[in-house]
Image (cartoon, rainbow, N blue to C red):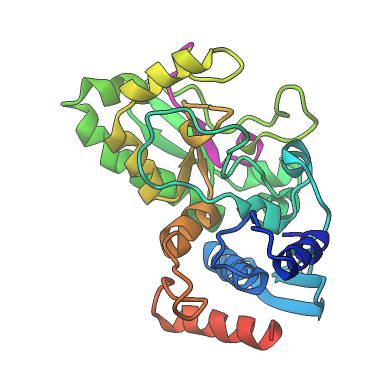
Amino acid sequence: MKKINIFIVSILIIINIPVISKVPAEKDYKTQMKQDVLILMLAYPEYIQGVEKKSDDEVYLIMKSGKKIIYDDMKNKNHEEKLANPDLQDMLEQEYPLQMTTEIMKKDFDPGRARHYELFSEVYGGSKGVIEKNLTNLKFGYTNYQFNKNNKANASLDAVFKELIPLAKTRGDIGSILYPASGTYNYRVISGTGRLSPHSYGIAIDLKSDKRDYWKWSSEIQGQKRLLDYPKELVEAFERNNFVWGGKWNHFDILHFEYRPEIILKAKYFGKWDGNHEWYDGSPVDENTKNHIEIIDNALQ
Protein backbone atom coordinates (compact mmCIF):
# COMPACT_ATOMS: atom_id res chain seq x y z
CA MET A 1 0.00 0.00 0.00
CA LYS A 2 1.55 3.28 -1.05
CA LYS A 3 1.69 6.48 0.97
CA ILE A 4 -1.17 8.24 -0.78
CA ASN A 5 -3.38 5.20 -0.35
CA ILE A 6 -2.74 5.27 3.41
CA PHE A 7 -3.93 8.88 3.48
CA ILE A 8 -7.05 8.07 1.46
CA VAL A 9 -7.85 5.07 3.65
CA SER A 10 -7.59 7.28 6.75
CA ILE A 11 -10.03 9.82 5.28
CA LEU A 12 -12.49 7.11 4.27
CA ILE A 13 -12.41 5.62 7.75
CA ILE A 14 -13.06 9.05 9.32
CA ILE A 15 -16.14 9.64 7.16
CA ASN A 16 -17.29 6.04 7.58
CA ILE A 17 -17.01 4.91 3.96
CA PRO A 18 -16.15 1.23 3.46
CA VAL A 19 -12.53 0.69 2.44
CA ILE A 20 -11.36 -1.82 -0.15
CA SER A 21 -7.68 -2.42 0.58
CA LYS A 22 -5.12 -4.19 -1.55
CA VAL A 23 -4.13 -6.28 1.49
CA PRO A 24 -6.47 -8.27 3.75
CA ALA A 25 -8.40 -5.96 6.07
CA GLU A 26 -6.86 -7.44 9.21
CA LYS A 27 -3.33 -6.56 8.08
CA ASP A 28 -2.21 -3.00 8.66
CA TYR A 29 0.68 -1.69 6.59
CA LYS A 30 3.36 -2.27 9.22
CA THR A 31 2.25 -5.87 9.80
CA GLN A 32 2.31 -6.53 6.07
CA MET A 33 5.78 -5.01 5.80
CA LYS A 34 7.17 -7.00 8.71
CA GLN A 35 5.78 -10.24 7.32
CA ASP A 36 7.18 -9.49 3.87
CA VAL A 37 10.63 -8.67 5.24
CA LEU A 38 10.68 -11.85 7.33
CA ILE A 39 9.64 -13.93 4.32
CA LEU A 40 12.40 -12.42 2.20
CA MET A 41 14.99 -13.11 4.91
CA LEU A 42 13.80 -16.73 5.16
CA ALA A 43 13.66 -17.16 1.38
CA TYR A 44 17.15 -15.72 0.74
CA PRO A 45 19.05 -16.44 3.98
CA GLU A 46 22.55 -16.22 2.51
CA TYR A 47 21.89 -12.97 0.69
CA ILE A 48 19.73 -10.74 2.94
CA GLN A 49 21.57 -9.78 6.10
CA GLY A 50 19.49 -7.06 7.68
CA VAL A 51 16.88 -4.33 7.45
CA GLU A 52 17.26 -0.59 7.87
CA LYS A 53 14.61 2.05 8.44
CA LYS A 54 15.61 5.58 7.42
CA SER A 55 12.08 6.95 7.81
CA ASP A 56 8.49 5.68 7.69
CA ASP A 57 8.75 5.95 3.90
CA GLU A 58 12.20 4.40 3.52
CA VAL A 59 12.82 0.84 4.62
CA TYR A 60 15.66 -1.10 3.01
CA LEU A 61 16.88 -4.66 2.93
CA ILE A 62 20.64 -4.92 3.41
CA MET A 63 22.18 -7.43 1.02
CA LYS A 64 25.31 -9.50 1.55
CA SER A 65 27.10 -7.32 -1.01
CA GLY A 66 26.25 -4.21 0.99
CA LYS A 67 23.65 -3.09 -1.53
CA LYS A 68 20.44 -1.63 -0.08
CA ILE A 69 17.12 -2.46 -1.76
CA ILE A 70 14.08 -0.37 -0.87
CA TYR A 71 11.01 -2.28 0.30
CA ASP A 72 8.37 0.19 -0.93
CA ASP A 73 9.05 3.04 -3.37
CA MET A 74 5.68 4.62 -2.42
CA LYS A 75 4.63 4.97 -6.06
CA ASN A 76 1.10 4.20 -7.21
CA LYS A 77 1.21 1.78 -10.13
CA ASN A 78 -1.25 -0.09 -12.26
CA HIS A 79 -0.81 -3.81 -12.86
CA GLU A 80 1.42 -3.43 -15.91
CA GLU A 81 3.63 -0.89 -14.13
CA LYS A 82 4.03 -3.29 -11.21
CA LEU A 83 5.20 -5.98 -13.62
CA ALA A 84 7.57 -3.58 -15.37
CA ASN A 85 9.14 -2.01 -12.29
CA PRO A 86 8.07 -3.68 -9.04
CA ASP A 87 9.44 -2.85 -5.65
CA LEU A 88 9.62 -5.66 -3.09
CA GLN A 89 6.18 -4.80 -1.73
CA ASP A 90 4.67 -4.99 -5.23
CA MET A 91 6.33 -8.35 -5.85
CA LEU A 92 4.78 -9.86 -2.73
CA GLU A 93 1.44 -8.07 -2.86
CA GLN A 94 -0.69 -10.76 -4.48
CA GLU A 95 -1.03 -13.89 -2.38
CA TYR A 96 -0.35 -17.12 -4.24
CA PRO A 97 -3.12 -19.72 -3.76
CA LEU A 98 -1.79 -23.09 -2.63
CA GLN A 99 -5.01 -24.92 -3.43
CA MET A 100 -5.31 -26.48 -6.89
CA THR A 101 -7.17 -24.43 -9.48
CA THR A 102 -9.28 -25.58 -12.42
CA GLU A 103 -10.27 -22.10 -13.57
CA ILE A 104 -8.39 -19.21 -15.13
CA MET A 105 -7.65 -16.63 -12.45
CA LYS A 106 -9.42 -13.28 -12.30
CA LYS A 107 -8.17 -10.32 -14.35
CA ASP A 108 -4.65 -9.13 -13.44
CA PHE A 109 -4.19 -11.76 -10.73
CA ASP A 110 -0.64 -12.98 -11.42
CA PRO A 111 1.07 -13.82 -8.09
CA GLY A 112 4.78 -14.31 -8.73
CA ARG A 113 4.78 -12.80 -12.22
CA ALA A 114 6.27 -9.55 -10.88
CA ARG A 115 10.01 -10.04 -10.42
CA HIS A 116 12.46 -7.79 -8.64
CA TYR A 117 15.52 -7.75 -10.84
CA GLU A 118 17.88 -6.09 -8.35
CA LEU A 119 17.15 -8.91 -5.92
CA PHE A 120 17.52 -11.59 -8.59
CA SER A 121 20.83 -10.09 -9.72
CA GLU A 122 22.16 -10.12 -6.16
CA VAL A 123 21.18 -13.77 -5.68
CA TYR A 124 21.58 -15.45 -9.07
CA GLY A 125 24.00 -13.20 -10.95
CA GLY A 126 23.98 -9.71 -12.42
CA SER A 127 25.14 -10.54 -15.94
CA LYS A 128 24.96 -13.38 -18.43
CA GLY A 129 28.54 -14.39 -17.70
CA VAL A 130 28.06 -14.48 -13.93
CA ILE A 131 24.78 -16.36 -14.21
CA GLU A 132 26.33 -18.98 -16.45
CA LYS A 133 29.10 -19.54 -13.92
CA ASN A 134 26.37 -20.30 -11.37
CA LEU A 135 24.64 -22.90 -13.53
CA THR A 136 24.90 -26.62 -12.87
CA ASN A 137 23.60 -29.63 -14.77
CA LEU A 138 20.86 -31.91 -13.48
CA LYS A 139 20.56 -35.12 -15.47
CA PHE A 140 17.26 -36.99 -15.64
CA GLY A 141 16.90 -39.66 -18.27
CA TYR A 142 18.66 -38.52 -21.43
CA THR A 143 18.28 -34.82 -20.67
CA ASN A 144 20.57 -32.35 -18.91
CA TYR A 145 18.78 -29.45 -17.26
CA GLN A 146 20.85 -26.34 -16.58
CA PHE A 147 19.76 -24.63 -13.38
CA ASN A 148 21.22 -22.03 -11.04
CA LYS A 149 22.94 -23.55 -8.02
CA ASN A 150 22.54 -20.44 -5.85
CA ASN A 151 19.94 -20.28 -3.06
CA LYS A 152 19.29 -24.04 -3.45
CA ALA A 153 17.45 -23.55 -6.74
CA ASN A 154 19.08 -26.58 -8.41
CA ALA A 155 18.61 -28.73 -5.30
CA SER A 156 14.93 -27.83 -5.29
CA LEU A 157 14.46 -28.83 -8.93
CA ASP A 158 16.35 -32.06 -8.21
CA ALA A 159 13.93 -32.80 -5.36
CA VAL A 160 10.96 -32.19 -7.67
CA PHE A 161 12.19 -34.68 -10.25
CA LYS A 162 12.96 -37.27 -7.60
CA GLU A 163 9.31 -37.06 -6.57
CA LEU A 164 7.85 -37.06 -10.05
CA ILE A 165 9.94 -39.59 -11.96
CA PRO A 166 8.66 -42.58 -9.94
CA LEU A 167 5.09 -41.30 -10.42
CA ALA A 168 5.64 -40.86 -14.15
CA LYS A 169 6.36 -44.60 -14.51
CA THR A 170 2.75 -45.43 -13.70
CA ARG A 171 1.03 -42.11 -14.42
CA GLY A 172 0.90 -41.41 -18.12
CA ASP A 173 -0.68 -38.00 -17.55
CA ILE A 174 2.42 -36.95 -15.57
CA GLY A 175 4.96 -38.60 -17.86
CA SER A 176 3.43 -36.99 -20.95
CA ILE A 177 3.94 -33.54 -19.43
CA LEU A 178 7.31 -34.17 -17.82
CA TYR A 179 9.03 -35.50 -20.94
CA PRO A 180 10.48 -33.85 -22.88
CA ALA A 181 10.69 -30.54 -21.02
CA SER A 182 10.81 -27.47 -23.26
CA GLY A 183 13.75 -25.91 -21.45
CA THR A 184 15.34 -24.32 -18.42
CA TYR A 185 18.17 -21.77 -18.80
CA ASN A 186 17.79 -19.42 -21.75
CA TYR A 187 19.19 -15.90 -21.56
CA ARG A 188 16.45 -13.84 -23.25
CA VAL A 189 13.92 -11.09 -22.69
CA ILE A 190 10.20 -11.74 -22.29
CA SER A 191 8.46 -11.30 -25.65
CA GLY A 192 7.05 -7.79 -26.07
CA THR A 193 9.00 -6.36 -23.11
CA GLY A 194 12.52 -5.31 -22.24
CA ARG A 195 12.50 -7.47 -19.11
CA LEU A 196 14.65 -10.54 -18.66
CA SER A 197 12.81 -13.83 -18.51
CA PRO A 198 13.29 -15.81 -15.28
CA HIS A 199 14.81 -18.44 -17.58
CA SER A 200 17.69 -15.95 -17.98
CA TYR A 201 18.58 -16.53 -14.33
CA GLY A 202 18.30 -20.32 -14.59
CA ILE A 203 15.42 -20.50 -12.09
CA ALA A 204 12.53 -21.60 -14.32
CA ILE A 205 11.54 -24.70 -16.26
CA ASP A 206 8.97 -25.08 -19.01
CA LEU A 207 7.60 -28.60 -19.25
CA LYS A 208 6.29 -30.23 -22.42
CA SER A 209 4.40 -27.65 -24.44
CA ASP A 210 0.74 -27.82 -25.42
CA LYS A 211 -0.91 -25.25 -27.69
CA ARG A 212 -3.39 -24.47 -24.87
CA ASP A 213 -0.68 -23.63 -22.32
CA TYR A 214 0.00 -19.93 -22.89
CA TRP A 215 -2.34 -16.95 -22.80
CA LYS A 216 -0.90 -15.51 -26.02
CA TRP A 217 -1.39 -18.80 -27.88
CA SER A 218 -4.74 -19.83 -26.52
CA SER A 219 -8.20 -18.65 -25.53
CA GLU A 220 -9.33 -18.68 -21.90
CA ILE A 221 -11.75 -21.49 -22.75
CA GLN A 222 -8.92 -23.63 -24.14
CA GLY A 223 -6.67 -22.71 -21.23
CA GLN A 224 -9.31 -23.74 -18.72
CA LYS A 225 -9.76 -27.11 -20.46
CA ARG A 226 -6.02 -27.62 -20.15
CA LEU A 227 -6.17 -26.78 -16.42
CA LEU A 228 -8.87 -29.40 -15.94
CA ASP A 229 -6.53 -32.04 -17.38
CA TYR A 230 -3.42 -30.98 -15.48
CA PRO A 231 -2.33 -33.45 -12.78
CA LYS A 232 -2.61 -32.06 -9.28
CA GLU A 233 0.26 -34.22 -8.01
CA LEU A 234 2.69 -32.65 -10.50
CA VAL A 235 1.80 -29.11 -9.46
CA GLU A 236 1.98 -29.95 -5.75
CA ALA A 237 5.44 -31.52 -6.11
CA PHE A 238 6.75 -28.28 -7.57
CA GLU A 239 5.03 -26.11 -4.95
CA ARG A 240 6.36 -28.25 -2.10
CA ASN A 241 9.81 -27.34 -3.38
CA ASN A 242 9.16 -23.58 -3.65
CA PHE A 243 8.16 -23.29 -7.30
CA VAL A 244 5.19 -21.21 -8.42
CA TRP A 245 3.04 -22.43 -11.30
CA GLY A 246 2.04 -20.20 -14.20
CA GLY A 247 -1.30 -22.01 -14.28
CA LYS A 248 -2.29 -19.84 -11.31
CA TRP A 249 -1.92 -16.61 -13.26
CA ASN A 250 -4.63 -14.76 -15.18
CA HIS A 251 -1.98 -14.41 -17.91
CA PHE A 252 -1.71 -18.17 -17.77
CA ASP A 253 1.54 -19.98 -18.59
CA ILE A 254 0.60 -23.55 -17.74
CA LEU A 255 3.84 -25.24 -18.80
CA HIS A 256 5.89 -22.80 -16.65
CA PHE A 257 7.29 -23.45 -13.15
CA GLU A 258 9.52 -20.88 -11.46
CA TYR A 259 11.64 -21.13 -8.32
CA ARG A 260 10.24 -18.40 -6.08
CA PRO A 261 10.64 -19.32 -2.41
CA GLU A 262 9.43 -15.90 -1.24
CA ILE A 263 6.05 -16.35 -2.95
CA ILE A 264 5.46 -19.89 -1.68
CA LEU A 265 6.68 -19.21 1.87
CA LYS A 266 4.42 -16.18 2.24
CA ALA A 267 1.40 -18.25 1.19
CA LYS A 268 2.44 -21.09 3.46
CA TYR A 269 3.25 -19.09 6.60
CA PHE A 270 0.94 -16.10 6.42
CA GLY A 271 -1.85 -17.13 4.05
CA LYS A 272 -4.14 -17.88 7.00
CA TRP A 273 -2.95 -15.16 9.39
CA ASP A 274 -6.06 -13.96 11.25
CA GLY A 275 -4.88 -10.80 12.95
CA ASN A 276 -5.47 -12.15 16.45
CA HIS A 277 -1.88 -13.07 17.19
CA GLU A 278 1.61 -11.64 16.88
CA TRP A 279 2.56 -10.44 13.39
CA TYR A 280 4.95 -13.38 12.94
CA ASP A 281 2.44 -16.08 13.96
CA GLY A 282 2.56 -18.90 11.41
CA SER A 283 6.28 -18.65 10.69
CA PRO A 284 8.69 -21.41 11.79
CA VAL A 285 9.54 -21.65 15.48
CA ASP A 286 13.33 -21.95 15.42
CA GLU A 287 16.30 -19.87 16.55
CA ASN A 288 17.08 -18.61 13.05
CA THR A 289 13.56 -17.25 12.59
CA LYS A 290 13.52 -15.79 16.11
CA ASN A 291 16.73 -13.90 15.30
CA HIS A 292 15.15 -12.48 12.13
CA ILE A 293 12.04 -11.45 14.08
CA GLU A 294 14.16 -9.65 16.66
CA ILE A 295 16.10 -7.80 13.96
CA ILE A 296 12.85 -6.76 12.26
CA ASP A 297 11.13 -5.65 15.45
CA ASN A 298 14.14 -3.58 16.49
CA ALA A 299 14.46 -1.94 13.07
CA LEU A 300 10.78 -1.33 12.35
CA GLN A 301 9.44 -0.11 15.67
- Residue situated furthest left in the rendering: 170
Instruction: Answer yes or no: is residue 180 visible.
Output: no
Residue under the point 30% across and 34% down:
232
Quadrant containing the C terminus is bottom right
Residue 147 lies left or right of residue 176; in this view the side is right
Give percent across and percent down for residue 163.
Answer: 27, 42
Residue 195 quadrant: top right
Give percent across and percent down for residue 99.
Answer: 36, 44
Decide: is 40 above or below 150.
Answer: below
Q: Nearer the viewer, residue 59 or 256?
A: 59
Give percent across and percent down for residue 262.
Answer: 54, 57
Decide: is 10 above or below 242.
Answer: below
Q: Nearer the viewer, residue 144 or 75?
A: 75
Taking the magenta stretch, the answer to whether it contains residue 281 is no
Residue under the point 45% across and 79% down:
277
- Range covered by the magenta-colored residues: 199-211
Residue under the point 58% across and 38% down:
109
Decide: is 255 above or below 220.
Answer: below
- Residue situated furthest front in the rendering: 15
